[in-house]
Amino acid sequence: MPLRLDAAADDFETRFRALLAAKREVSEEVDEAVRAILADVATRGDAAVIDYTQRFDGLSLTPETLRIGKDEIEAAYAAMEPHTREALELAHARIRSHHERQRPTDDTYVDALGVVLGSRWTAIEAVGLYVPGGSASYPSSVLMNAVPAAVAGVARIAMVVPARAGELNPLVLAAARIAGVDEIYRIGGAQAVAALAYGTESIRPVAKIVGPGNAYVAAAKRRVFGTVGIDMIAGPSEVLVIADGENDPAWIAADLLAQAEHDAAAQSILITDDAGFADAVEAAVAVQLKQLSRQDTAAASWRDFGAVITVPDLDLAPPLADRIAAEHLELAVDDPDAMFARIRNAGAVFLGRHTPEVIGDYVAGSNHVLPTARSARFSSGLSVLDFVKRTSSLKLGPEQLRALGPAAVELARVEGLDAHGRSVSIRLNL
Amino acid sequence: MPLRLDAAADDFETRFRALLAAKREVSEEVDEAVRAILADVATRGDAAVIDYTQRFDGLSLTPETLRIGKDEIEAAYAAMEPHTREALELAHARIRSHHERQRPTDDTYVDALGVVLGSRWTAIEAVGLYVPGGSASYPSSVLMNAVPAAVAGVARIAMVVPARAGELNPLVLAAARIAGVDEIYRIGGAQAVAALAYGTESIRPVAKIVGPGNAYVAAAKRRVFGTVGIDMIAGPSEVLVIADGENDPAWIAADLLAQAEHDAAAQSILITDDAGFADAVEAAVAVQLKQLSRQDTAAASWRDFGAVITVPDLDLAPPLADRIAAEHLELAVDDPDAMFARIRNAGAVFLGRHTPEVIGDYVAGSNHVLPTARSARFSSGLSVLDFVKRTSSLKLGPEQLRALGPAAVELARVEGLDAHGRSVSIRLNL
């Protein structure tokens, strides 16, 4: 049974705080192992990557077979069922068109003194894309990570995907082909992150690494941060559904389970003002659970991390939503726009009864890589901005330097930085 | 003597690679100590912060004296010399006006199918600002970190600054007052980072922590990343000057030393096409060094990490600049705009002979918190964007769900996610 909280109860604040503070991630002791793997790949390059791939993935590679051949990628694309290809291509086109609106614009202007100030955006030169293997090897995630990079103008996208015992999801290769990615290596884990960050004889280094992964991948990304850029450290997925009693309980139950089936550590929370509706949703969850191929995962998530919160009035829901700061937030109410206007912290919001979160996972066009574990308080979903960087520029002539220089000299003086002062005063003959 | 490289020499590529790979940061073994401090503050709150402040800063505090009183801040402001106040207020006004141009705009649109897609930006609710103590306690850095947060609309900015033996730079308080920051705690180190990230009885937690600090602060920020957001992990400062032989060697020498005086690990690099000019700059550096109050620091930086690179033609400089990816890049050449157009990787670029980098440190209006240690390859200087986050939104009606739903159901099917498929199909009566 999921946690059941009543916002009108005396112990609500205490229990709600405990819900927010609960750790859903297994803190595996992987950091020491990852440190050794990174150092080994930095030193031995390909040979180390090949050794770890043999050990962890049971796959024998050579420098020549690290990279997946063009023929293998084309074959995976060609083997797709037409219906699947159409769905992936629709998703690709919509993701592309949405992200094209995110390109930042340069800004150069001359101020009242004649100083020219500029902000210029350029694409990161090379990006590494980590794609998990096994049951979490999703073609949709390939599109969600690769398309913003491509739209940003990243010239080189290098993808890694582990092939345990040689097995690869061909749809991951097909999705890469659709996104225009053709540099793909059949490696994973910390060794793949190291290869992308440091480079090897066969794999040129990149400047930034994005994409989800297991605890080893997350620890490796944290460690190489600085040498390269990284995206967020992704945690288990979560959804918060705010629903009034006018919804079909079965619809809301399906939405809660769509989150829960991802991962036993995923979290699904319902806030409603109708206790009877809450009961009906719980009953519908129990029924639908039995029909899922991943019912063990979904049941564990719902039992261990699920929560149903009843509030006396839905007006109380937005402040709770801000504290939960959910990755996904569904507003299944009569006036979802009005409620959205009262909410600050959420990765993505799904408005109204006909916008299940799953549409955003696949085909809406917005990105499904979103801030988890309450990080929507301070971070955003993946976008074109994650693949560009801004260079500021300044241009003064002698007149502008005369106008601004003395204040700079004064600040250098009070900060005790003589050479700072001199680099201005020497140009002013001060 | 700084390193001298000749781009026309046979061993240039090898030596240039070594220059790029050289580690300038002392890797102190602080991580274990930091881990313990963070855990202790998370558990014991104020008491732990007070204990560490006693131990590391030699300062006895109580929960009541952790926070600096309004009167102390006002007194620091009132005690400023008028010339200093004018310089800080000029800097503040210019930083504010530049950063106001950086506010991102929301984007909501309806696509051809009638799907409403939105991107909405909101300010982070609470931000912590770390200000170093001692000789690196700069009022200019207070402005550079606080103003973008204020412009972004951050409602609460909490500042921490260590007061070793009770000593505080009053100009840091005055700069905070000018920037509108009045919540200031006299604490520093990993314990201050922990207090901001986890909260204590006296200090409410924030959602993001920005600002430079020593190795303990950097290690603490890396560890709390995830619980809160952080800005970059700042490394030692660096400048690359590309200069032709038409410059006054003394001007360029002053610019190189302005970087070197920051830190013994700072790095100043000159690229020129005129070997005689390079000699003259080296000679001018030797002369000017003797006149600096921080000559030991500047001399160590120039000796250990300085470099002078001669190229047969300045056309060869942009690709080298891209590989160096300097925090600060001065283009002291006839047509700096043309050269800038050929360069991709730099934190900030200073165009022409009358734009010393120091103007950007203080009064130009652009931010002086910039990516160090080659991270301009993948990251940007501090801006308003660091203090906002984006929530995406989607709104479909029954018609839009009928149009897009089947493709989502198909992708859910091939990804093996039954509940994903059901949350769409149940709404379509499929």
Image (cartoon, coloured by chain):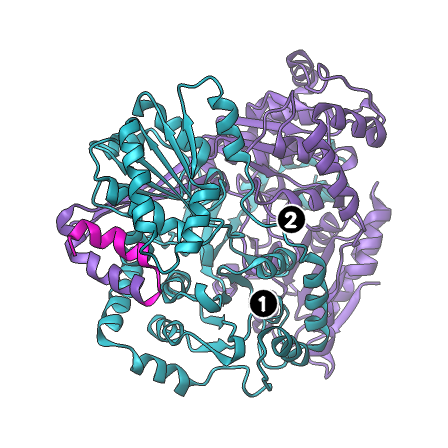
Chain colours: A purple, B cyan
Q: In the displayed image of the protein, which residue is found farthest to the left?
A: A399
- Give the labeled residue for mark 2: A233
Residue at image position (47%, 42%) is B305
Region in magenta: A414-430
Residue at image position (53%, 31%) is B18
Q: x and y percent of residue A177 in the render? A: 60, 21
Q: Give the left or right position of residue B224, taking residue A417 as reference.
A: right
Frontmost residue, B289 versus A82: B289
Q: What kind of residue is marked 2?
A: Ile
Foreground mark, 1 or 2?
Answer: 1
- Give the labeled residue for mark 1: B189
Quadrant of the drawing holding the C terminus of chain B = top right
Residue at image position (47%, 66%) is B131
Q: Real-space Cα distance between discs 1 and 2?
A: 24 Å
Q: x and y percent of residue A398 in the render? A: 14, 47
Q: Chain letter for mark 1, please.
A: B
Q: Give the left or right position of residue A151, taking residue B66 as reference.
A: left
Residue B51 visible in the displayed image: yes
Element marked by disc 1: helix
Frontmost residue, B362 versus B403: B362
